[in-house]
Image: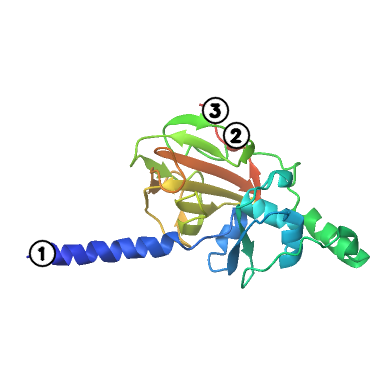
């Protein structure tokens, strides 16, 4: 009988999927470093993003960017924050006064945070990319439900081919951060990077060179998704840009 053999294969497959989905990757371009260590810190009463960043020695702008936080004042108790580079969860002392920081520390933080600030003067190249999938635009770039939506959503049937928006190199292929599901990241010329999330299947591997229009994945609904669609992002030097400024008009 083949039933026990098939059952064993299925069990092994589910185990591998479970292991992969547990490997959380940093957001934005930090996601390219899939082997970077880190921990999840659960926000407690009285803890602010400032206190948490200070306790772990992480620039606050980087912590905001990685965790998709655009309004630190609305940080809620129980929120799980990814802390890159940390070995263990720390007790955050909320009694620390900002004035306790030395002038040298404040100057260093200001300099580092300035580097993290997105460049708003980057000019988009209209038509540089092609549409990665045939479907209907269901969600645009920008503010959505009180948070910033870093890309656009294109609704399509499960299994619909997804193609590379431009020629480039596969920098990441696998399970992304919480919510992104099975995803791909392609690096293009001019410091552009495209992200393809919620896929049901990927057809390419890391470090592979792909051509514009080459099939790279299939539409799915993995991760935090309400139905089959492609979440598509365009980034320039890690800053999220409006993909519609790069895509040809339909």
Can you see residue 147?
yes
Residue 125 spot, x, y in % from top left: 64, 38
How packed mark 2 is, by other alpha carbons closer than 10 Å (few <14, some 14-19, many 20 or more), is few
Q: Are marks 2 and 1 in contact (CB under 8 Å)?
A: no
Query: Which is more toward the observer, 194 or 146?
Result: 146
| Between discs 2 and 1, the one toward the N terminus | 1
Q: CA distance from mark 1 to mark 3?
A: 53 Å
Q: Nearer the viewer, mark 2 or mark 1?
A: 2
Q: Position of residue 77 (x, y in %)?
A: 64, 51
Would you name the residue on which mark 1 appears?
A: 2
The residue that appears at 77% across and 60% down in the rendered structure is: 94
Q: Which residue is mark 3?
A: 249
> Which callout, 1 or 3, points to the residue nearer the camera?
1
Does 76 appear above or below 14?
A: above
Badge 1 element: loop
| Colour scheme employed for the rendering of this structure | rainbow
Looking at marks 1 and 3 on the same chain, the residue that comes earlier in the sequence is marked by: 1
Residue lying at the far bottom of the rendered structure: 87
Give the quadrant of residue 92: bottom right
Q: Which secondary structure lies at badge 3?
A: loop
Residue 151 position in % (x across, y down) = 57, 40
- Distance from disc 2 to disc 3, alpha carbons, whole Å, reads 26 Å
Residue at image coords 59%, 37%: 246
Which quadrant does the N terminus fall into?
bottom left
Q: Earlier in the sequence, mark 2 or mark 3?
A: 2
> Can residue 57 be seen here?
no
The residue where tag 2 is placed is 145
């Amino acid at each position: 009988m083949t039933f026990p053999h098939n059952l064993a294969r299925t069990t092994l497959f589910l185990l591998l999927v479970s292991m992969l989905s547990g490997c959380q990757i940093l957001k934005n371009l930090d996601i390219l470093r899939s082997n970077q260590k880190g921990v999840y810190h659960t926000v407690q009463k009285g803890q602010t993003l400032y206190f948490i960043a200070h306790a772990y020695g992480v620039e606050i702008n980087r912590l905001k960017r990685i965790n998709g936080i655009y309004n630190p004042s609305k940080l809620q108790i129980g929120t799980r924050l990814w802390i890159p580079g940390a070995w263990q969860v720390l007790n955050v002392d909320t009694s620390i006064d900002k004035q306790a920081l030395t002038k040298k520390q404040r100057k260093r933080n200001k300099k580092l945070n300035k580097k993290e600030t997105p460049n708003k003067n980057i000019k988009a190249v209209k038509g540089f990319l092609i549409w990665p999938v045939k479907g209907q635009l269901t969600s645009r770039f920008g503010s959505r439900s009180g948070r910033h939506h870093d890309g656009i959503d294109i609704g399509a049937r499960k299994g619909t081919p997804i193609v590379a928006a431009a020629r480039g190199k596969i920098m990441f292929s696998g399970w992304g951060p919480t919510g992104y599901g099975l995803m791909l990241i392609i690096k293009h010329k001019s410091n552009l990077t495209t992200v393809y999330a919620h896929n049901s299947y990927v057809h390419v591997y890391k470090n592979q060179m792909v051509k514009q229009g080459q099939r790279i994945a299939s539409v799915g609904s993995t991760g935090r998704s309400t139905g089959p669609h492609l979440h598509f992002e365009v980034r320039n030097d890690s800053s999220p840009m409006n993909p519609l400024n790069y895509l040809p008009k339909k």
